[in-house]
Image (cartoon, rainbow, N blue to C red):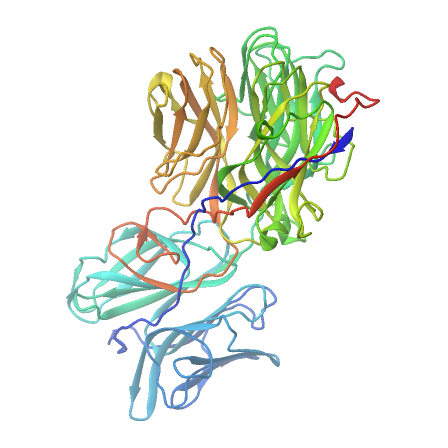
Amino acid sequence: MKRWSRVSSLGALILVAAVCATTSPVTASAAAPTLSVAPRNELTIVAPAGAVVPSVTTQTPGITGFGSSRTWATGTMSVQLSAFTGETFKVGTFQSGHAAGRLGVSITNNGASCTDGASSRVTVHEFTYDGDGLTSLAATLQANCSGTGQTVAELRFNSTVGAQRVGGLRLGQDGALRRVTLTTPEATTVQDIFWAGDLTVVVKANTCNGASLPAGGTCYVDVVPRTLEEGGEYIALSIRDAEAKRLDTVSITALGLQSPEGAYTPLATAKRFLDTRPGNVPLRAGTPRDLQVLGVNGMPSTGISTVVVNITVVAPNTGGYLTAYPAGTTAPTASSMNFSKGQTIANLVTVRANAGKIRLLTSATTHVLVDVVGYYRNLAGTSSDPRAYGSFQQVEPYRLYDSRKDVKVNGYEIFDLWTDFGDDFNRRTKALAINVTVVAPEGPGHLTVWNGLNSTTVPNTSTLNFTAGRTVPNMTVVPVSLCYSCNAAGTGVPAFSIANASSKRVHVVVDVVGVFDDNSVEFGSRLKPLATPKRVVDTRASLGFKTLGAGATGTASAASVSTPWTTSLSGNLTAVGPTKYTWLTIWEAGTPKSGVSSMNPYPGQNVAAMVMPGISDARQFSVNNAVGTTNVILDVVGTFEFYNTEEYAPETGVFTADTGLVASEAPGALTKAPDSKGIAPDKASASRTGSPASAPASKVNSR
């Protein structure tokens, strides 16, 4: 094939904003309460591998110092904390440093040291002084000493403030439930729980708020911790009275660890794993067939939970459906794709693998092609390069290219498309989730979308198939390469290629619906596959909402499949029996409808399409039907869960509910995790020059 260039441009994109944390001193009572609990001298260190000071369990250190300075030492390790000259400790969170309003920090181990890093800070929970100086102190220190994440040190000097240590916890994973018991030194009614820190917890039970307690009385809070940043994190919970006086405090520390689970890895080039046409061995109606997808054809044998496959049905003997699901399990009620008699049609499917296999079941006898385009990792999916753990970045869908505003794509033409997210994010982009639509083709054929920059060798796989005059969409996830000649500035921009494997001209429309990064970008999401697909919308049974008329929008809940941390869904959207040619759009409820379509069904056609819509704070999404009337089905195969690798600064807030989230991203109780950080393209384009290409010696449309 000969290569061509196309030129177009794109305007601005609305961003999904992320909540940023800030650090500020907190005004609170400095006096420590008088409790029956004996004061303690303790040192606990939670640190990532390679830190200056290794993690240690709670120990009784030697404590030395005078005035407003103390040093905790055990073995070869020591931690020193000092107020600035002429100042005393205050309750609150402060940057470290030897300057007014800061606290001096020094951590040493075997001669190595870390002092007053730019991102180091200290939260003072309580302190007392007498005429001779400091008599008690409870503080939590956070320092970036190793470049691999924060070190957290719990410091106690003659203090009753409690401390719990969770240990290592993978990012985005829930820890075990912990009970935090708090004791009041005086008879009181607990007004609320004040919290400070950057460790997020889900409160499962709260007996403290509003509790009337005698002196020495106790209440408890049951929490489930969840780490949202690499390295040490903490949260301190304090019960307070009506005058906001702190009565007791307990802090919890945890070590956030990088995790491969749910991370996406695109194949450099899609690979064909099944083609039933050679040997004429079609799938038979009602007879399942298992397909080995791990440990063969260059795929890893372990470390994979879910595969992303493009399934093409070729010449079925009757209309029907095909379902892809984990091998060795019961077939779900959900379908992966629908087809008409004799039709050749493709759909991208995300399916969990079991024992390295997926299972295919069809209601009609048909030939089937299966191309693997990528996979999601599980906990065993280790790699020496943490940037192999790519996360999904939700974007508001935008149109990258529309040849209807240019000229038709020629037969046997290859062209490149690129998008520009800015220099910093461009180099972090691994793959794009895109919808590709063929409009008004002049003959039958197929398109192949791949990472083919500067190549005329087209893979032996197809992305979508079309017939004359029919509009056909399909989603794919395409890996990208940096193109340094695509833009005038000569900076690398993510680019990919499209080949028209037909001798006839077609219009091509490309919409971007998401981005996969290299794990170096904050506020991403990871896939959590469901054990079996879950149907959340079926308008035929009034599930979710009712049949959609012309221009109608239905809004449904994803609460049955989502968590407070879910940012997006991975699912299969099906139009059932539309009365007219139409297009459906699915998007996050409560936001403006996207300007791009998710599928384009014809009258009477049942057609499915993979979708990745965001969901709202209320865990809802919306579907709009443009023309005529249609029933709608949505089967969810997995959810994208919030996953962050960047550092949060400690926050503060007041928790008054019985259950809910206490999180570092925003004060108070939340009902949903922060949205993924939207990535806005500065410019998106494709370039095209030249004249129609001649057919290659080896016809690509023979595939």
User: What residue appears at the point 49 percent right and 51 percent down from the top-left corner?
Assistant: 523
Horizontal and vertical percent position of residue 242: 17, 65
Q: Is residue 215 above or below residue 211?
A: below
Q: Quadrant of the N terminus?
A: top right
Q: Is residue 395 above or below residue 428?
A: above
Question: Residue lying farthest bottom?
Answer: 132
In this rendering, would 546 be left or right of 78? left
Horizontal and vertical percent position of residue 387: 63, 52
| Residue placed most toward the observer, 208 or 368 | 368
Q: Is residue 127 above or below residue 540?
A: below
Horizontal and vertical percent position of residue 261: 56, 45
User: In the rendered image, which quarter is residue 22 located in?
Assistant: bottom left
User: In the rendered image, which quarter is residue 48 located in?
Assistant: bottom right
User: What residue appears at the point 64 percent right and 51 percent down from the top-left corner?
Assistant: 427
User: In the rendered image, which quarter is residue 141 located in?
Assistant: bottom left
Q: Is residue 528 visible?
A: yes
